[in-house]
Image (cartoon, helix red, strand yellow):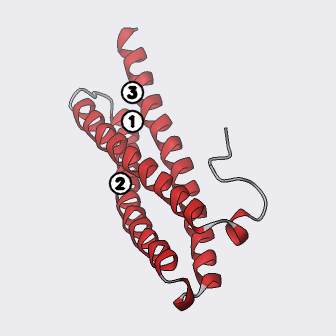
Amino acid sequence: MENFRIRPKGDFIENGDWQELYILTEHWKSDLLFYKDDLRFLRHLEDKYFLWIKAQADLDNIRRAGESILKDSRDCDELLERVGKHLLHIAAIIDDPEKQNYKTFRVEHNELEEEVTKFIKNTRRNRRELFKVIEMDVEVDKM
Protein backbone atom coordinates (compact mmCIF):
# COMPACT_ATOMS: atom_id res chain seq x y z
CA MET A 1 0.00 0.00 0.00
CA GLU A 2 2.91 2.36 0.56
CA ASN A 3 4.20 1.98 -3.00
CA PHE A 4 2.11 4.27 -5.22
CA ARG A 5 4.13 3.80 -8.37
CA ILE A 6 2.36 2.07 -11.22
CA ARG A 7 5.38 1.49 -13.41
CA PRO A 8 7.36 -1.73 -13.67
CA LYS A 9 10.30 -1.98 -11.31
CA GLY A 10 13.90 -1.86 -12.41
CA ASP A 11 15.32 0.42 -15.07
CA PHE A 12 11.99 1.19 -16.76
CA ILE A 13 12.52 4.96 -16.78
CA GLU A 14 16.01 4.64 -18.25
CA ASN A 15 15.08 2.10 -20.92
CA GLY A 16 11.30 2.23 -21.26
CA ASP A 17 9.56 2.68 -24.58
CA TRP A 18 8.40 6.25 -25.27
CA GLN A 19 4.81 5.20 -25.81
CA GLU A 20 4.82 3.35 -22.47
CA LEU A 21 6.24 6.41 -20.72
CA TYR A 22 3.51 8.50 -22.33
CA ILE A 23 0.81 6.10 -21.10
CA LEU A 24 2.31 6.13 -17.60
CA THR A 25 2.27 9.92 -17.59
CA GLU A 26 -1.36 9.89 -18.77
CA HIS A 27 -2.11 7.72 -15.71
CA TRP A 28 -0.48 10.37 -13.51
CA LYS A 29 -2.67 13.00 -15.09
CA SER A 30 -5.78 10.90 -14.56
CA ASP A 31 -4.86 10.28 -10.91
CA LEU A 32 -4.19 13.96 -10.33
CA LEU A 33 -7.54 14.91 -11.87
CA PHE A 34 -9.21 12.45 -9.49
CA TYR A 35 -7.37 13.97 -6.53
CA LYS A 36 -8.34 17.46 -7.68
CA ASP A 37 -12.02 16.45 -7.50
CA ASP A 38 -11.45 14.66 -4.20
CA LEU A 39 -9.78 17.74 -2.72
CA ARG A 40 -12.67 19.92 -3.91
CA PHE A 41 -15.04 17.57 -2.06
CA LEU A 42 -12.88 17.67 1.07
CA ARG A 43 -12.83 21.48 1.01
CA HIS A 44 -16.61 21.47 0.71
CA LEU A 45 -16.88 18.99 3.59
CA GLU A 46 -14.54 21.07 5.73
CA ASP A 47 -16.47 24.27 4.96
CA LYS A 48 -19.83 22.68 5.82
CA TYR A 49 -18.53 21.03 8.95
CA PHE A 50 -16.80 24.21 10.15
CA LEU A 51 -20.22 25.78 10.79
CA TRP A 52 -21.19 23.10 13.34
CA ILE A 53 -18.06 23.00 15.47
CA LYS A 54 -18.44 24.19 19.05
CA ALA A 55 -15.14 23.54 20.84
CA GLN A 56 -12.11 25.78 20.21
CA ALA A 57 -9.75 22.79 20.02
CA ASP A 58 -11.92 21.27 17.29
CA LEU A 59 -11.93 24.59 15.45
CA ASP A 60 -8.15 24.66 15.52
CA ASN A 61 -7.93 21.04 14.32
CA ILE A 62 -10.37 21.55 11.46
CA ARG A 63 -8.59 24.78 10.49
CA ARG A 64 -5.23 22.96 10.33
CA ALA A 65 -6.76 20.14 8.29
CA GLY A 66 -8.36 22.70 5.96
CA GLU A 67 -5.06 24.51 5.46
CA SER A 68 -3.37 21.22 4.56
CA ILE A 69 -6.09 20.41 2.06
CA LEU A 70 -5.82 23.89 0.54
CA LYS A 71 -2.06 23.40 0.14
CA ASP A 72 -2.71 20.01 -1.46
CA SER A 73 -5.09 21.68 -3.92
CA ARG A 74 -2.41 24.18 -4.96
CA ASP A 75 0.18 21.39 -5.23
CA CYS A 76 -2.23 19.37 -7.37
CA ASP A 77 -2.76 22.27 -9.77
CA GLU A 78 1.00 22.76 -10.07
CA LEU A 79 1.60 19.06 -10.70
CA LEU A 80 -1.17 18.95 -13.31
CA GLU A 81 0.51 21.80 -15.15
CA ARG A 82 3.91 20.09 -14.98
CA VAL A 83 2.47 16.75 -16.12
CA GLY A 84 0.78 18.52 -19.05
CA LYS A 85 4.11 20.02 -20.12
CA HIS A 86 5.77 16.65 -19.64
CA LEU A 87 3.22 15.01 -21.94
CA LEU A 88 4.01 17.62 -24.59
CA HIS A 89 7.70 16.87 -24.13
CA ILE A 90 7.12 13.13 -24.63
CA ALA A 91 5.00 13.83 -27.71
CA ALA A 92 7.84 15.96 -29.14
CA ILE A 93 10.28 13.11 -28.56
CA ILE A 94 7.97 10.62 -30.24
CA ASP A 95 7.41 12.97 -33.20
CA ASP A 96 11.04 13.98 -33.71
CA PRO A 97 13.42 11.75 -31.73
CA GLU A 98 16.58 13.15 -33.38
CA LYS A 99 16.29 16.63 -31.84
CA GLN A 100 15.71 15.64 -28.22
CA ASN A 101 17.84 15.27 -25.10
CA TYR A 102 16.77 11.91 -23.72
CA LYS A 103 18.86 11.99 -20.58
CA THR A 104 17.36 15.30 -19.42
CA PHE A 105 13.89 14.01 -20.16
CA ARG A 106 14.38 10.81 -18.18
CA VAL A 107 15.74 12.73 -15.18
CA GLU A 108 12.71 15.04 -15.38
CA HIS A 109 10.42 12.01 -15.64
CA ASN A 110 11.92 10.41 -12.55
CA GLU A 111 11.66 13.64 -10.53
CA LEU A 112 8.06 14.13 -11.58
CA GLU A 113 7.21 10.58 -10.60
CA GLU A 114 8.72 11.17 -7.15
CA GLU A 115 6.70 14.34 -6.68
CA VAL A 116 3.42 12.72 -7.79
CA THR A 117 4.07 9.85 -5.38
CA LYS A 118 4.86 12.25 -2.54
CA PHE A 119 1.73 14.27 -3.33
CA ILE A 120 -0.51 11.18 -3.23
CA LYS A 121 0.91 10.04 0.11
CA ASN A 122 0.52 13.51 1.61
CA THR A 123 -3.02 13.97 0.31
CA ARG A 124 -4.14 10.63 1.71
CA ARG A 125 -2.63 11.48 5.08
CA ASN A 126 -4.38 14.85 5.14
CA ARG A 127 -7.71 13.26 4.17
CA ARG A 128 -7.37 10.80 7.07
CA GLU A 129 -6.61 13.69 9.44
CA LEU A 130 -9.72 15.59 8.37
CA PHE A 131 -11.89 12.51 8.83
CA LYS A 132 -10.37 11.88 12.27
CA VAL A 133 -11.20 15.42 13.39
CA ILE A 134 -14.77 15.11 12.15
CA GLU A 135 -15.19 11.64 13.60
CA MET A 136 -13.90 12.69 17.05
CA ASP A 137 -16.20 15.69 17.17
CA VAL A 138 -19.21 13.62 16.10
CA GLU A 139 -18.40 11.02 18.79
CA VAL A 140 -18.10 13.74 21.46
CA ASP A 141 -21.44 15.23 20.40
CA LYS A 142 -23.10 11.79 20.70
CA MET A 143 -21.91 11.51 24.30
As measured in the structure, the alpha-carbon distance from the residue carrying label 1 to the one carrying label 3 is 12 Å
What amino acid does circle 3 point to? Answer: Ile
What amino acid does circle 2 point to? Answer: Ser
Foreground disc of the pair 1, 3 = 3
Instruction: Determine contact: label 2, label 3, CB under 8 Å.
Output: no
As measured in the structure, the alpha-carbon distance from the residue carrying label 1 to the one carrying label 2 is 24 Å
Compared across the picture, whether 20 is left or right of 92 comes to right
Seen at 28% across and 28% down, the residue is: 53
Given residues 120 and 108, the one toward you in this image is 108
Q: Which residue appears farthest toward the top when viewing the image?
A: 143
- Mark 2 or mark 3: name the one nearer the start of the chain: 2
Q: Is residue 139 above or below residue 66?
A: above
Given residues 32 and 17, the one toward you in this image is 17
Looking at the rendered structure, the number of numbered marks drawn on it comes to 3
Foreground disc of the pair 1, 2 = 2
Work out which quarter of the rendered image holds the N terminus and state it. top right
In x, y percent, where is residue 138? 37, 18
Seen at 56% across and 48% down, the residue is: 121
Q: Is residue 92 above or below residue 73?
A: below
As measured in the structure, the alpha-carbon distance from the residue carrying label 2 to the one carrying label 3 is 20 Å
Residue 57: which numbered mark, if any?
1
Compared across the picture, whether 77 is left or right of 23 comes to left
Asked if one can make out residue 64 in the rendered structure from this viewpoint, the answer is no
Q: Secondary structure at mark 3?
A: helix
Q: Which residue is mark 3?
A: 134
Q: Which residue appears farthest toward the bottom when viewing the image?
A: 99
Q: Which residue is mark 2?
A: 73
Work out which quarter of the rendered image holds the C terminus and state it. top left
Foreground disc of the pair 2, 3 = 2
User: Label 1 neighbourhood size at 10 Å, few (<14), some (14-19), many (20+)?
Assistant: few
